[in-house]
Image (cartoon, rainbow, N blue to C red):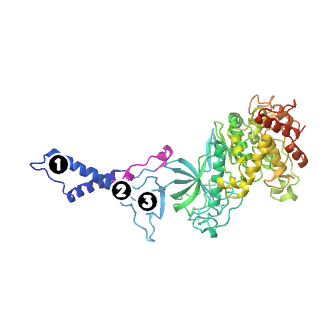
Amino acid sequence: RGLGASLVGGLGVMAASRVLRVPRPTARTGRVSWLLCFAAHVAILSKQFVPSEAAPLPMHPDAAALNPAWRIDEPGLGTWETCDTCEQCVLDPVPGGMALPTPEPGTDGKVRCKKCLGCSVILTRLQPSQPMLGKDVKIFTGASGAAVLKGVTAEKGSVFVKTWCGLAGGYRQTPRNQEIPKTCAKDGLHLREDEKSPCGDRGGIFGWSECNFAFLNALDSLALDANLSSATPRTWTETMRSFLPTGGYGAHEDNSEFPPDPSGGTKVDSVRAQFYEPAPGVSVEAFFGEGATDRVLGVARRIKHDQVVKAAVFDLLFSEQDRHGQNVFVSEDGDVVVLDNEGSFGPVNSMLLPGGQKFEIYRIGYGAVCCGNLPGGKPKNCPGKQSETSAPEVWVDYRCHIPGRFVGTNLPPGVEPFLRRVEKMSADEVFQFYKMAHPKHARALKQKVDDMLDGGFERALLATYARQTPGNGEDYGNDFFYGVHPPCCATHERGCVIRGAKIREPGLPVWQGNEPGKEASGLWIQGTVKLPDQEDQAATRGSSGPNNDGKADEDAETARRRNSARKLLSYFF
């Protein structure tokens, strides 16, 4: 690829040597001296005509594998700058010392290129499915209508790219979604400060840009500081120089074709987007959807327990309200991560945490939880009927993956020091330090920090639910609480049966030998956990004092943990 640059540089050196009149050898100057002088001129001129940019850039192995090959003289080769449309992006820059390659424009004056040098990211559409353990697993693209694409960059390799506005050409995630706006008219960088709309309290809003970026980047920084960044892919904002992928939308599940994609090949002109590390595996909902087959049970039993607990702590600490099985990913090796965290800093509604609507849908069925949201509404569907079996997704209940089925104050490493740091900050200081999109987010975090430090994980969970609305089995929403039922951590256990499971005795557990400990037996085994009333909560918050033996604790941390346990257990005994 550097051959063209070398030839140009060499010709330039030859021409310049004539201009500079390199002395010919004479009686006084021998041939060796003349050659040394000429070599010095060549070295100087080579630096002028072949700058360092001509050298190939170091590339991530993923990028090197996917970056298209090219020749400087091949027809249709252009650059990001010179092409109006392009079929294939190339991450390599234009070799130094060369004019920008530019194909001839068409009759409409537009330059249409086959390949384009100088892209910052190669974009492709998501595939409808991917294989895992012999199964073709569906890929969900989300319901928001945002543009979600696969990408590859020279530095990071494989990434995912998401944007909610700023794409030209009429891009749609699918033909059923609305068109991505060409400009970010709410909060784009092109707007003056007095023209921008203030950020709302939700993230990932269609048509917005900088507010979404601030929301997600603040959450990424918080997760990093809390040592929870392994629970979710890292994310950051970048400016893209690229072209939208060609090839159309793909095909329907019945192999019938979608209508043509008008956006294919359109230039992505310095559009800001959110980049994500790729998540391993596939969505829990797509893979577990076949029921408790041997394949599904095998993956469930390989799940890395500490990763589920980290993800659950992430969802409670950062108040995730939209954690369903399409944005919890599991790999064939048992790795678990959560993604699409745009529902953070709201009410808590996560399939990893028992008691919320997302969890209850997998436990007793959609119709039993929100029958009024089915076609025909409440008159036709309510009251709903509880399913006789639970979905295998209940196996990612955090209680199935913590020793003794109870966290208490035994939080993942790094979380408690983070809680202590945030406890000392005001909500405004948290908002400013993490560059949050909305002050409400800092207040929500401060509340969770106080709850966790006051009585541990389970107390924080129940205190959160006490602020939410009791579910009525009819309405759909994120702000509901249904009571916490005993966990189902096996193919069948204490009355619960997983859909598709072979009934055998004893039931096959997700974690062999992880039986409920004393705390879990007191909380989960006796039946549905009811919330304390507000007077009881106030009383337990104010309780403190000596240990059981009447002596003051010599260690403040021991005192805190004992007091936390007393507060939690006083709710139920």
Label 1 element class: helix
What amino acid is at disc 1?
Answer: Trp
Pointer 2 or 3: first along the chain: 2
Q: Position of residue 454 (x, y in %)?
A: 80, 43
Direction from residue 250 to residue 14 in the image, left or right: left
Residue 253 visible in rendering: no
Q: Position of residue 124 (x, y in %)?
A: 55, 53
Which of 124/434 is in front? 434
What amino acid is at disc 3?
Answer: Thr
Judge depth for marks 2 and 3 and give the one in front.
Answer: 3
Q: Position of residue 448 (x, y in %)?
A: 76, 48
Q: Mark 1 packing: few (<14 Cα in 10 Å), some, or many (20+)?
A: some
Q: Which residue is mark 3?
A: 79
Pointer 3 or 1: first along the chain: 1
Q: Quarter of the image holding residue 244?
A: bottom right
Q: Position of residue 216 (x, y in %)?
A: 64, 53
**Label 2 near label 1: C-beta < 8 Å?**
no
Residue name at image x 76 percent, y 36 percent: 557
Depicted 19 relative to depicted 414: above or below: below
Pointer 1 or 2: first along the chain: 1
- Distance between the Cα atoms at labels 1 and 2? 37 Å
Residue 445 visible in rendering: yes
Which of 319/508 is in front? 319
Which of 31/322 is in front? 31
Q: Which residue is mark 2?
A: 73
What amino acid is at disc 2?
Answer: Asp
Q: Quarter of the image holding residue 390?
A: top right
Q: Which residue is mark 1?
A: 34
Depicted 503 relative to depicted 246: above or below: above
